[in-house]
Image (spheres, rainbow, N blue to C red):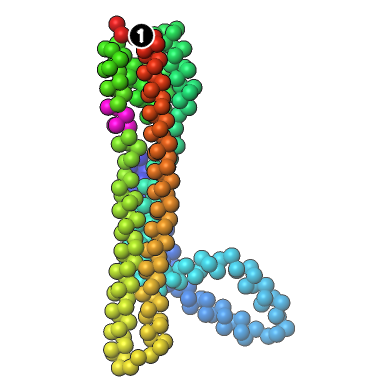
Amino acid sequence: MKKLFAFVAVFGMLFIGTSVNAFAQDEPQDTTAVEQVAEETPAIMGEEVEAEPAAEEGGELHKQIKIKFVEGGAQFMGAILLTLIIGLAIAIERIIYLNLATTNTDKLLKKIEEALESGGVEAAKDICRNTRGPVASIFYQGLDRANEGIEMAEKSIISYGGVQMGLLEKNLSWISLFIAIAPMLGFMGTVIGMIEAFDNIEQAGNVSAGLVAGGIKIALITTVSGLIVAVILQVFYNTILSKIDSLTNQMEDASISLVDIIVKHNLKK
């Protein structure tokens, strides 16, 4: 179900991005038309002409982004946008999973100890079953082997703790891959754009400042876009790592407390 949700989200965002791209192709012409009408408006209507830019100021950045996206080229800009969409989809899924995996360990340990005193191991295991998160799963494995001795309980906790760590770090390698790929795609687009600019210079037969500057500007757009995407994904990646470290410390501390409880109640049969 999680994979299906991720795929639906990715395809939905791709559809929106494609629609924005198609709309952006006509945007520069509309902007020019608005500027021409504004220049031809009589001075008597000056107050109304000044009111329109103020109303459209909020959407000016959005228009500029769409224009730069079209200028950078559909191939490489589309690939960079795709890395951003997929990377964000994975990062958001990981953040939601880690938030749901967070458990109040002090409260859980208290409930388990009370259950051991009143109903025994099975009552404590029922509490672990009904509690969400990796800590409760680790506790369940430790309690399940508690009757075989403290050493077996510790081994079970350590082994299943490694399994839970793997689940917490799932798909992080894909985010790091997109962080590395996004700037590379940008640099590749820049190099190809520079080659095209020099081809235009060769065909023109002379070096024109406007021709060179325009080609270089368009070529560098892909590099800037790739770096922006990498920075965004890096922030999410570090946030996820910080959350995983916090959960890991929580699992280790709680596991030690659980072992102390098992020793205290002498659950070995």
Residue under pointer 1: 266
Q: Residue at x 35, y 8 (%)?
A: 266
Q: Nearer the viewer, residue 22 or 210?
A: 210
Q: Nearer the viewer, residue 179 or 78?
A: 179
**In which image quadrant can residue 221 be found?**
bottom left
Residue 135 percent coordinates (x, y): 39, 27
Q: Residue furthest bottom?
A: 205
User: Is 75 situated above or below 32?
Assistant: above
**In which image quadrant can residue 268 be found?**
top left
Q: Residue at x 35, y 71 (%)?
A: 73
Circle 1 packing at 10 Å, graded few (<14), some (14-19), many (20+), is few
Residue 253 percent coordinates (x, y): 41, 27
Residue 248 percent coordinates (x, y): 38, 34
Residue 23 percent coordinates (x, y): 44, 68
Q: Which quadrant is home to the N terminus?
A: top left
- Residue 161 among those drawn in magenta: yes
- Please give the range of residues in magenta: 159-164
Mark yes or no: residue 22 visible: no
Instruction: Report the predominant secondary structure element of the magenta stretch.
Output: helix
User: Is 60 situated above or below 106?
Assistant: below
Q: Which quadrant is home to the C terminus?
A: top left
Q: Secondary structure at mark 1?
A: loop
Q: Residue at x 63, y 68 (%)?
A: 55
- Residue 166 among those drawn in magenta: no
User: Is 85 situated above or below 151?
Assistant: below
At label 1, the amino acid type is Asn
Mark yes or no: residue 171 visible: yes
Q: Is residue 128 left or right of residue 110?
A: left
